[in-house]
Amino acid sequence: MISDRDVALYREQGYLVVRDVLSRDEVAELRRVTEEFVEQARSVTTHDDVYDLEDSHSAREPRVRRIKTPHQWHPTYARMVSHPNILAILQKLWGPSIRFDVSKLNLKAAGYGAPVEWHQDWAFYPHTNDDLAAIGIMMDDVDEENGALMVIPGSHKGPILDHHAEGVFCGAMDPSKGEVDYGAAVPLTGPAGSITIHHVRTVHGSATNTSGRPRRLLLHQYRAADAWPLMGVPDFQQYRSLLLCGEDTLEPRMALVPVRLPLPPAAHQGSIYENQRAAGRRFFKTADELEPAAV
């Protein structure tokens, strides 16, 4: 699915977009299941184990910004975890042994889908080495207007930046510090069925969906099997069951990588949207802050 040149670009820039990873039928099935989940959210009034809701959510107009761990709730999502095309790409990047971590489905509905502030995934879950990445499955055609994921090229080679506010982890960088060149951000766009790949240390975020089209991105976090979490393994057998291909190991590969622990924990535990509430500074405007004509 990817060439040696693509591997070199990923290592240099910290991201890739790969087209035609999923078939049209697979995309259609993901959309159908997702629409069913949003419809079922009419009976939900607050965040729970399945849903993270927009502030403007109601039974009359269900507004879901995230389905949490979707692979646990429906077999269609679960099948995507070990999709052979995705595993082939990861093996090209890291070698034969790949372990899954977790999934989430971020939904940016037309005209108001919530932004995600600039951050590095590494801030949330440092490991013994940084052969980790997030795969984003595009369920819709994605462009800048409907809230494409944006990355800062090459930022995965830099430091782990501060994701704390007043000494407490909040899962967001402070844009006023100017630690990266936000003007250099690249939107990861493409047709439905494409995937994005971004390195665990790549600085990334996404703006509000200002278009009349949805942007649904199914995100999977993966790691090389010899990358072990520095925050520990609460359930050893469950952790080992996440191996998708290759051989398991009890010998973590140790790499000299920068680490900043996500402690003390976020004041608003939950999804990244809840974590970032405590940041106290924002780069992206929400739908109610934009001019009416823009949304």
Image (cartoon, rainbow, N blue to C red):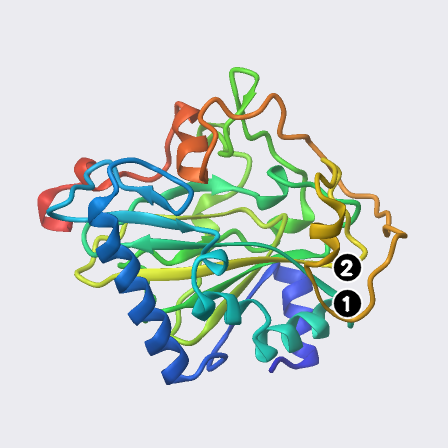
The spot of residue 256 in percent (x, y) is 83, 44
In this rendering, the answer to whether 208 lies above or below 167 is: below
Q: Circle 2 — which element? A: loop
Q: Examine the rendering and report whether any part of residue 275 can be seen.
A: yes
Which mark, by number, is residue 97? 1
Task: Please say if 260 is above or below 211.
Answer: above
Residue located 60% across and 38% down the image: 124
Looking at the image, do the residues carrying marks 1 and 2 touch, with CB atoms under 8 Å apart? yes
Find the distance from the CA under tag 1 to the CA under tag 2: 5 Å
Q: Amino acid at mark 2?
A: Ala
Residue 128, by quadrant, is top right
Numbered label attached to residue 85: none
**Of the pair 44 and 275, the residue shown nearer to us:** 44
Q: Which residue is mark 2?
A: 225
- Quadrant that contains the N terminus: bottom right
Which residue is pictured at 40% across the width and 61% down the height? 217
